[in-house]
Structures are given as C-alpha cells and as structure tokens.
Amino acid sequence: MFIKLGVIGMSEGNGHPYSWSAIFNGYDPDNMRHCGFPVIPQYLAEQPWPQARIANAQVTRVWTQDSTLTRHIADAALIETAVDDVQQLCIGVDAVLLARDDAERHLSLAAPALKAGLPIYIDKPIALSQRAMDDLYALEQYPGQIFTCSAMRYSPELQLSTQDREQVGPLREIHAVTPKSWNKYAVHIIEPVLNMLDPDDTPVEMERSAGASQGSALCVRWKSGVITRFVATGVDSSAPISLRVIGARGWQDKIFHDSFTAFKAALQDFVNGIRSKSIRSPESFNRKVVSLIEAGRTPE
C-alpha cells in the first residue's frame, strides 16, 4: 500500500514541515541549507540516502500560511504540489501531517482532514487543555483517526531497557528537564516518563511551581509511590532534554540527542497504523499527557 501524504506547516521555531517531509521524500541539499534550522540539514546529511527514506509513502502536497514559504518547503523536500489552502491539501492524499506545534491552531487546521475522514498526525502537543482536546476528538470519524505524539516517546535514548530496570531496581523518582517553554516542550519529557511508569498508574497529588519566562515545573506523586518532576526551563539553551531515573538499587541519566531516529520512528508508526488500521496513539494515553500539561501551565 503506497501512502500519499499532505503536510500542513509551519509555526514559529518549528522546522518539522522540512524535516518530516524529507524523511519521506529525500531532500535537495542546496534548498534545505536555507530552511532556517541549521540542525536539520546537519542531521539529514548524516543519513544514507535514499535508504533513509520511509518506504512506500511520500509527501505529495504542502500548504503553509505563506506561499513563498510553501514553495521553499516543496523545493527543499521534493514535494510535487504546493497548494493554496487546507481544503486543497486534503484532495488526492491518503493522510495528513499537521506539522505545527502551536496547539491553539490545531482545531481549525485539523478540521478539514478530520471531517474528510483522513488519518492525521497532529504535532505535539495536541492540546493545552482537556477542553481543547475534547473539541478535536469530537471531530474524529473513527477510533484512531487522530495520531499525536512527541517523537521523544520513540527515542531509544529515553527508554528503559530490561537491563536498565534490573540495574536501577523498582522506580522511586524521575527528574525530567527540557529547555524552552512549558506549553510547547513539556510534552517532550512527559511522554517518555509515562512510558516508564505502569500504564495504569495515576496521579494522586500534583504541585506546580513557576519557572523562568514561559517555563514551569510540575511535581507529581503517583499512586504507585513514584515521584516525577517535570521542568521546562523557559529559555533557549544548549542543554539537552534529559531524564534522571532513580530506583531502589541505582540511577541512570538518559540524554536525548538523535532527532532523526526519533522523528522517523514516530512517522513510521503513524504509517504503520494506517496500513494495519490499528490505533497507534491511544486517546487514553494522550489525555493523560494533556492533563499533566494543563496542570503545569501558568494560569491565564
């Protein structure tokens, strides 16, 4: 089954329309060099092409709010058609990538694809409140139509192997830190931490504390007794996304650095779900994520 995708972008500071499309299509190095995100051509150049592409799927259409930008993404990521509006994007494709991380725009931009019954990958975070998430899921035509995640959920560097769990022993605490704003980046540490906990574990106590500009911290005590602390520093920095996992017998630091592998794994899972008609991004998990994002947000 060959899958044609349309990509919607872009939002400030987010180069996913370039990188995600390149993972499917390959890319033009000269145009990609001017994408505005130096890290993207850097990690793309480290991959073997065309072998690095996701097989049997291609981004064939792209739309952004700026026609010049749309054309540049198309040229950089070898996309056949640049379209003028979101409705056109949904014509002749099998699925949609909503590659914007400004959650407040997700409902209006996702609505055409949802109403058309197209599977859609909504960039992280899907929403900043349970109410906003309700509005999106109210448009879902069938279970699993919405796929959303932080690619950090798929990062091998932020996972606990069986050997890791044996070394650290029963979990006691997890301290997770990300640079930049809580609203856009807390999801990057929340999802991999939830992967480490029992899926049935639930918060019993949460305490938020204010951080630097747009930053925040949320301490959560879980029913299992595990304590997690999520910190978004609120500032751009060279410090990586990191987790410190503390158990009864030891501890480990998990440091994220491989964007390409995480992005490709997430996109591949989205495509796999389309082919197998299976739910790869459970609503229950996504609701747990959004509940923690909402609990840590600065009151408006």
Image (tube, rainbow, N blue to C red):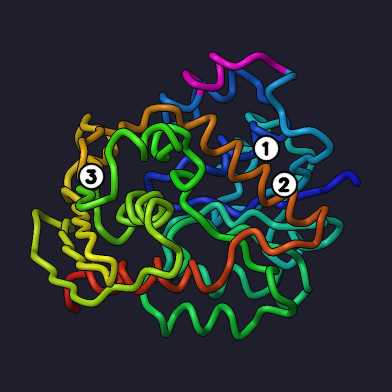
Q: Is there CB contact under 8 Å for labels 3 and 2? A: no
Q: CA distance from mark 1 to mark 2?
A: 6 Å
| Tag nearer the camera, 3 or 1 | 3
Res 179 visible? no
**Foreground residue, 150 or 77?**
150
Q: CA distance from mark 3 to mark 2?
A: 51 Å
Q: Amino acid at mark 1?
A: Ala
Task: Name the residue rendered at 54%, 30% in the picture.
Answer: 261
Query: Which mark identifies residue 247?
Result: 3
> Is 275 above or below relative to 167?
below
The residue under label 2 is 82
Q: Amino acid at mark 2?
A: Ala
> Is 266 above or below relative to 222?
above
> Is 275 above or below relative to 60?
below
Q: Which residues are magenta?
A: 41-49
Q: Quadrant of residue 24?
A: top right
Tag 1's secondary structure? helix
